């Protein structure tokens, strides 16, 4: 799954392509690598940041994506993600507390017991992945759920393979959360079905595919 921004004020006219589309190598790298800086005595802690052509993102707390809005908007339009559950059936397969944090030049990982949540910083947006290293002991659908913090609006989605489009009150597109797929260690792939209820996103990998998969399995 993925997050990409749009600075367009007209729906879909000048948007950055969602990360679910094929990646294109830019002629020049417009990314700012994941970094920190000394704290500001007046402004407080700097945190951990990265940036692309049309956005910045932070990793020091929950992952937060901030599209660049230019002078069109008087304030930022951020979206934050916090993983709240990873289940097979009704049974948790991960301990989602106190992750080990791993920082690379353009990749940041939250390493939980049973699940790694990762973000790759690209020119056009951020690629979000979840890696399940070992086969769950129980059979059934795998569902990863994240709580969102944002004041942007998106229509409810129920078990659909497709993107979620976040907009302002006038319907202008601000951010796209791309359609997800899952693949296993052999490269076998399946669509991931997304639901959104206004507060959480749920990513469902079908249990029949999971039962035949070779682990690790990645939701992308």
Image (cartoon, rainbow, N blue to C red):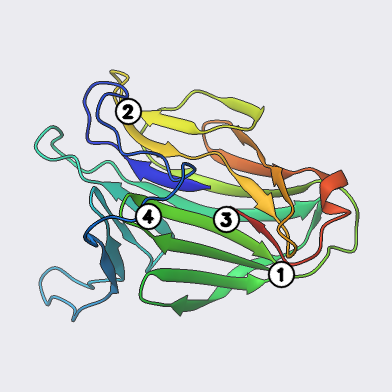
Label 4 with label 3: CB-CB less than 8 Å: no
Q: Which residue is mark 2?
A: 173
Q: Upstream in the sequence, badge 1 or badge 3?
A: 3
Q: Upstream in the sequence, badge 2 or badge 4?
A: 4
Question: Label 1, label 2: how many angstroms apart (C-alpha)?
Answer: 35 Å
Task: Report the residue at 81% width, 63% height from top.
Answer: 214
> Nearer the observer, disc 2 or disc 4?
2
Q: Which residue is mark 4?
A: 64
Q: Nearer the viewer, residue 141 or 190?
A: 190
Q: Upstream in the sequence, badge 4 or badge 3?
A: 4
Task: Report the residue at 30% width, 21% height from top.
Answer: 11
Q: Which residue is mark 3?
A: 83
Q: Residues within 10 Å of mark 3 (few under 14, many from 20)?
A: some
x and y, in percent, of residue 202 in the image:
63, 42
Question: Label 4, label 3: how many angstroms apart (C-alpha)?
Answer: 12 Å
In the picture, the disc for residue 114 is: 1
Q: Residues within 10 Å of mark 1 (few under 14, many from 20)?
A: some
Find the residue positioned furthest to the bottom.
Answer: 38
């Amino acid at each position: 799954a993925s997050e990409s921004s749009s600075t367009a004020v007209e729906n879909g006219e000048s948007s950055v392509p969602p990360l679910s589309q094929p990646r294109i190598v830019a002629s020049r790298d417009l990314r700012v690598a994941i970094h920190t800086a000394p704290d500001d005595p007046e402004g407080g802690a700097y945190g951990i940041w990265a940036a692309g052509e049309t956005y910045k993102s932070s990793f020091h707390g929950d992952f937060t994506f901030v599209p660049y809005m230019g002078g069109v908007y008087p304030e930022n339009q951020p979206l934050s993600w916090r993983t709240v559950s990873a289940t097979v059936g009704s049974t948790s397969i991960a301990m989602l507390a106190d992750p080990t944090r791993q920082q690379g030049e353009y990749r940041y990982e939250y390493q939980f017991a049973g699940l790694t949540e990762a973000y790759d910083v690209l020119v056009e947006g951020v690629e979000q992945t979840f890696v399940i290293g070992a086969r769950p002991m129980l059979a059934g659908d795998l569902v990863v759920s994240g709580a969102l913090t944002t004041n942007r609006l998106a229509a409810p989605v129920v078990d659909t393979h497709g993107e979620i489009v976040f907009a302002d009150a006038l319907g202008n597109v601000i951010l796209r959360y791309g359609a997800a797929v899952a693949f296993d260690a052999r490269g076998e792939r399946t669509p991931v079905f997304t639901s959104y209820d206004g507060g959480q996103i749920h990513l469902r990998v079908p249990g029949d595919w999971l039962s035949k998969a070779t682990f690790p399995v990645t939701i992308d």
